[in-house]
Each structure stands twice: as structure tokens, then as C-alpha cells.
Amino acid sequence: VRATLVDKGGEPARMISQNLEKIRMKDSEEFRFYRMGVLPALEMLASKGEKFDIIFMDPPYRIVPDLARDAAELICRGDLLNDDGMLIVEHAEDNPPEYDQIALEHVRSCSYGITVLTFFKNNKEKRGIS
């Protein structure tokens, strides 16, 4: 089991670093933390040949449509998801990703108050890849 965490900076990044230190996992094989934007991180991970079962995005809600589209494009181009992998995007109910602009198969959306988790599945057939 392994987790790759990405955050651009500020308080959330500081908290991630502190929590990894507290559980003595800061420099472990199980957790990797990159203090950078999600799009450069996806490009870097793709260049390393990384593959993931789940990619979870929790961006600022106001930028979800554009960021989810751009991230999904990099995820597909970089072949970052395993065959049955999922992209999960957290967003506000009134600002969802634009499903028709995401090159992954929309599976479902689950609401939790004003927060929604939207699930996309890696579907190489939809993307024209065999």
C-alpha cells in the first residue's frame, strides 16, 4: 500500500508534513509528499511511469471544472491510472466537473450535504485505446 500526496503549499502542505512526521512516515516508502501544483505533479509522476488505482482530487471548489478537465487529460495522456483505476473529484454541488470534457467514464456522483464526490473510471475503450 502506498499513498502519494500533492499540495501546492500553505497551511495544508505544512499540516501534511507535520502529520507524516508525527507518524514517522515522512521519508518512508509508503507515503510520498510533493509540495507542488497538481498539474506539474501529474506530469512528473507520468514521466516516472507511475500508475495508480485511485487518484483523489480535492481542489478549491471554484476551479473544479477547469482543473478536473486538465488533470484528467494529463492522467489519460500519462497513462497514470491502472486499467480499473478511478479518478475521484470532490466538488461543490453547484460547480461539478464538465463530464463531457473529461476523457474518463463518469460512473456516479455521491452527495454529502453541499459536497459531492464524482467518480470517473479509466475506460481505454472510450478513449480509443485497446
Image (cartoon, grey):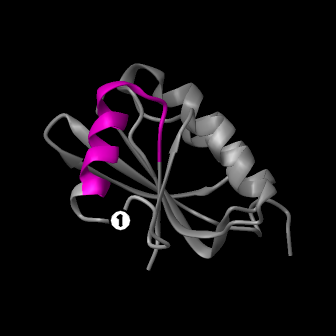
Q: Secondary structure at mark 1?
A: loop
Left or right: 94, with 4 as reference point: left
Q: Is residue 92 visible?
A: no
Left or right: 10, with 103 as reference point: left
Left or right: 31, with 66 as reference point: left
Q: Give x and y (percent) for residue 103.
A: 69, 50
The residue sitting at the top extreme is: 62
**For the C terminus, which image quadrant?**
bottom right
- Local crowd size for mark 1, using a 10 Å CA cut-off: few (<14), some (14–19), many (≥20): some
Is 93 within the magenta?
Answer: no
Left or right: 63, with 95 as reference point: right
Q: Give x and y (percent) for residue 4.
A: 49, 59
Q: Give x and y (percent) for residue 113.
A: 13, 40
What is the magenta segment's predominant secondary structure?
Answer: helix
Q: Give the residue displayed 23% in from the left and 39% down from the top.
A: 115
Q: Give x and y (percent) for residue 84.
A: 58, 77
Q: Amino acid at mark 1?
A: Met
Q: Of 117 and 41, which appears nearest the observer?
A: 41
Q: Give the residue displayed 37% in from the left and 26% down from the top.
A: 61
Numbered circles on residues, count: 1
Q: Is residue 56 visible?
A: yes
Q: Which residues are magenta?
A: 6-21
Is 16 within the magenta?
Answer: yes
Residue indicated by mark 1: 25
| Quadrant of residue 20 within the rendered picture | bottom left
| Quadrant of residue 102 within the rendered picture | top right
Q: Give the residue displayed 33% in from the left and 49% down from the top.
A: 117
Q: Decide: is 101 above or below 42.
A: above
Q: Give the residue displayed 49% in from the left and 36% down from the top.
A: 97
